[in-house]
Image: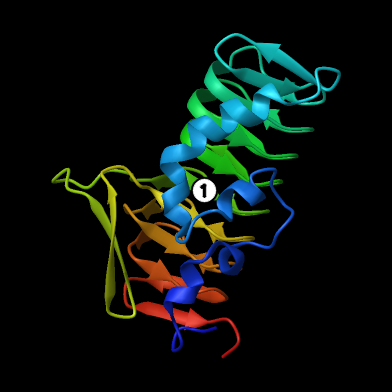
């Protein structure tokens, strides 16, 4: 799939992500469109956390489960409805507000804020990122200062437009979906409802809107090229 053959199929969970790189995989596969899972993240975390092995996970108040191999900085804020997986790092002054799944080996860095998020295994948001109502795929990386904007300026519901078809999400808050191994350059802004296909690279200081196909380089709005050309 390239920039000339963008289709609605890109928005299916198995086209954005490879299976097996998150404990949320079966949960995500229940939905026709990937963003439909976002309102149910909190319930999924509560249900999944309650079934985790107490020999492997520490249980904290407010529906928080932290794997015993995870490294949590003493200055990090640990809110409610959280699962932090094996080998994950939550660094100095990270702010895990509510409803976040931090996958195995994932990194939540210095002054990073998470709210209603699924981070796949080995995903990284390492420096000064805001990630809200979003998903970060396997080995995807948000450069320093890159943020998801999850609410439109007029507070209307977010829609997704792909191949001339407008899909109404019915959600006022929807940030971004980053496929596997996506690289987001430093200080970029991902506008509400942004979806970036796997293995795509976004230049630093970008303002990203809409659907960006997999395997591309996003240089600026209107200038997106295939890596294979």
Can residue 90 be seen here? Answer: no
| Left or right of 36, for residue 86 | right
Instruction: Give the color scheme: rainbow, by chain, secondary structure or one colour.
Output: rainbow
Task: Answer above or below: position of 90 versus 21.
Answer: above
Which image quarter is the N terminus in?
A: bottom right
* Quadrant of the rendered image containing residue 70: top right
State the image coordinates of residue 79 (x, y, percent, origin top left): 51, 17
Compare residues 62 and 147 and report the one nearer the observer. Answer: 62
Q: Secondary structure at mark 1?
A: strand
Residue positioned most to the right = 55
Q: Which residue sits at x=56%, y=42%?
A: 118
Task: Answer above or below: position of 166 versus 116.
Answer: below
Query: Pointer 1: what residue?
Result: 135
Compare residues 206 and 88 and report the one nearer the observer. Answer: 88
* Quadrant of the rendered image containing residue 16: bottom right
Task: Answer above or below: position of 129 versus 51.
Answer: below
Q: Which residue sits at x=59%, y=13%?
A: 75
């Amino acid at each position: 799939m390239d920039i000339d053959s963008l289709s609605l199929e890109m928005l299916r969970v198995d086209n954005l992500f490879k299976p097996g790189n998150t404990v949320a995989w079966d949960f995500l596969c229940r939905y026709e469109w990937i963003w439909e899972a976002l309102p149910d993240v909190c319930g999924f975390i509560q249900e999944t956390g309650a079934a985790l092995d107490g020999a492997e996970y520490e249980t904290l108040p407010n529906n928080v489960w932290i794997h015993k191999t995870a490294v949590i900085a003493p200055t990090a804020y640990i809110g409610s409805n959280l699962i932090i997986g094996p080998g994950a790092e939550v660094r100095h002054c990270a702010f895990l507000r509510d409803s976040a799944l931090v996958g195995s080996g994932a990194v939540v860095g210095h002054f990073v804020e998470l709210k209603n998020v699924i981070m796949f295994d080995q995903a990284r948001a390492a420096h000064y990122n805001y990630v809200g109502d979003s998903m970060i795929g396997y080995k995807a990386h948000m450069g320093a200062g890159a943020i998801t904007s999850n609410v439109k300026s007029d507070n209307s519901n977010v829609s997704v437009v792909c191949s001339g078809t407008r899909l109404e999400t019915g959600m006022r808050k929807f940030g971004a979906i980053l496929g596997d191994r996506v690289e987001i350059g430093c200080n970029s802004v991902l506008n509400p409802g942004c979806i970036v296909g796997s293995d795509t690279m976004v230049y630093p200081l970008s303002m990203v809107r809409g659907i960006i196909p997999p395997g591309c380089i996003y240089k600026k709005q209107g200038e997106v090229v295939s890596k294979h050309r």
